[in-house]
């Protein structure tokens, strides 16, 4: 998979960022670090690069998974064992990435907010451009950034500075009911057309209510799902430099028309236009759908107590449209750790971030919560790869990022999910919705910062 990410995000910039980080690190002491506080005051280079052993910090993080043990508290306890003089207070953030971002940007712009926050991989450009995050490459040396799986640091970079330390990666996967496919002599579908056919067969026998559940609510998740269909159909949202809309294309209309047909034909529920990750997960875990599109952690949710499909779930790369090379595209998601520019505990923040991206925390995230580790050594360990079927197929997925290198990405995405949601809820038609989205994106990109 590292090859895939590198291809998707481009390798050149990783090298450039690493070089800048080294140059800055060798300059030594960094002024922001001397602000100190909470017992973590330090102006030494070692503390500035994450070796502080005292302090207290607040960590803003959304729940990560929705069932079983809470990964955040599991990780905090282990961290506090390793660093008994650093106290971490968890602030639980909203589940919806858009609400999360809106709440956080209001707090930070107002001069407050947590010390460290877990933020989406699509935030670096916006947060970097608006000084909502500390450029971490000023503090942590090249050797630190070299430890991540290829492409991730590049995705966390805006204008030559790395703003987020990659914490875990998400990718879209196709979850299926092993038992029902087998009973009906069906293979795991590799095309969308096969997925529809299989759904009709199994729905027709009354074995499931729905064929396919995904995320179609009026929010970021609908953009992620659309990116997959759009890329499968051969379309793009923006040009290479992310300065112009390229959305208005037959490929985009094909993608949205297909999404519309899923709901119209009853393969997906009428309520798709209100589904986020949780609703689609719950429908699948209740045994009501043959297929589910969700992120890597959905596997651990599907096997948690309370699920009706324990032992019955398989996972595969996403399908594509007939005639296209398989597999289909998986959107890249995931979360980074960022530091608030108002933090008075930067030295302890960095210790926490280094530990969270290190071997112990990353192994826990992967083996207990089926998250894709960002730490390259952990990702390539065979114990981790054998921990569950999702991690075993990470090397087979084909990735597509969202066009988030522009600070105007929030408006670009809003144009997309508004179109998708309008079509799924029946209030718009695909070709018109794409045209409207295209002109909203054009004005968003022309509007400066
Ligand atoms: C997941 C992804 C994130 C994405 C979000 C959309 O949390 O990791 O990147 O924006 O889902 O709902």
Image (cartoon, helix red, strand yellow):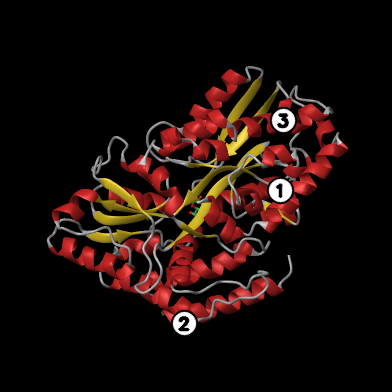
**Residue carrying label 2:** 250
- Inter-mark Cα distance, 3 to 2: 50 Å
Residue 215 visible at all: yes
Residue positioned 68% across, 42% down in the render: 145
Which of marks 2 and 1 precedes in the sequence? Answer: 1
In-front residue for pair 272/336: 336
Q: Pointers 3 and 2 in contact (CB under 8 A)?
A: no
Q: Residue 286 at x, y = what percent?
A: 25, 47
Q: Secondary structure at mark 1?
A: strand
**Residue carrying label 3:** 50
Q: Residues within 10 Å of mark 2 (few under 14, many from 20)?
A: some
Q: Residue 281 at x, y = what percent?
A: 34, 49
Residue positioned 64% across, 34% down in the render: 353
Q: Residues within 10 Å of mark 1 (few under 14, many from 20)?
A: many
Label disc, if present, on residue 162 of the rendered structure: 1
- Inter-mark Cα distance, 1 to 2: 36 Å
Q: Secondary structure at mark 3?
A: helix
Which of marks 2 and 3 precedes in the sequence? Answer: 3
């Amino acid at each position: 998979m590292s090859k895939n990410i590198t291809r998707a995000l481009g390798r050149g910039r990783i090298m450039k960022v690493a070089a800048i980080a080294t140059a800055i690190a060798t300059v030594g002491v960094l002024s922001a670090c001397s602000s100190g506080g909470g017992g973590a005051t330090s102006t030494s280079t070692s503390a500035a690069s994450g070796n502080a052993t005292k302090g207290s910090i607040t960590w803003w993080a959304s729940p990560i998974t929705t069932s079983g043990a809470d990964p955040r508290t599991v990780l905090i306890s282990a961290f506090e064992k390793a660093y008994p003089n650093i106290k971490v207070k968890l602030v639980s953030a909203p589940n919806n990435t858009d609400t999360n971002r809106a709440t956080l940007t209001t707090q930070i712009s107002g001069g407050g907010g947590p010390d460290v926050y877990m933020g989406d991989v699509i935030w670096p450009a916006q947060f970097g451009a608006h000084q909502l995050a500390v450029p971490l490459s000023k503090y942590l040396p090249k050797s630190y950034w070299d430890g991540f799986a290829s492409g991730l640091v590049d995705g966390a970079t805006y204008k030559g500075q790395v703003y987020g330390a990659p914490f875990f990666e998400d990718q879209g996967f196709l979850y299926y009911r092993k038992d029902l496919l087998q009973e009906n002599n069906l293979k795991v579908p590799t095309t969308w057309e096969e997925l529809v056919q299989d759904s009709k067969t199994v729905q027709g026998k009354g074995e499931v209510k729905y064929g396919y559940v995904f995320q179609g609510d009026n929010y970021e998740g609908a953009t992620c799902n659309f990116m997959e269909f759009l890329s499968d159909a051969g379309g793009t949202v923006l040009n290479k430099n992310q300065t112009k809309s390229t959305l208005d294309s037959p490929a985009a209309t094909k993608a949205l028309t297909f999404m519309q047909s899923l709901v119209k034909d009853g393969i997906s529920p009428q309520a798709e236009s209100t589904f986020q990750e949780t609703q689609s997960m719950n429908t699948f875990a209740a045994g009501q759908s043959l297929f589910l599109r969700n992120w890597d952690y959905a596997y651990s949710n599907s096997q948690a107590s309370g699920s009706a499909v324990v032992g019955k779930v398989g996972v595969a790369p996403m399908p594509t449209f007939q005639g296209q090379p398989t597999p289909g595209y998986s959107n890249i998601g995931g979360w980074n750790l960022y530091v608030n520019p108002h933090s008075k505990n930067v030295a302890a923040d960095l210790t926490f971030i280094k530990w969270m991206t290190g071997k112990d925390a990353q192994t826990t995230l992967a083996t207990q919560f089926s998250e894709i580790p960002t730490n390259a050594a952990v990702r390539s360990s065979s114990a981790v790869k054998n921990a569950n079927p999702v991690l075993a197929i990470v090397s087979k997925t084909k990735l597509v990022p969202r066009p988030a290198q522009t600070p105007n990405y929030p408006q670009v995405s809003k144009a997309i999910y508004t179109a998708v949601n309008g079509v799924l809820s029946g209030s718009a038609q695909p070709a018109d919705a794409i045209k409207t989205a295209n002109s909203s994106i054009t004005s968003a990109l022309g509007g400066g910062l």
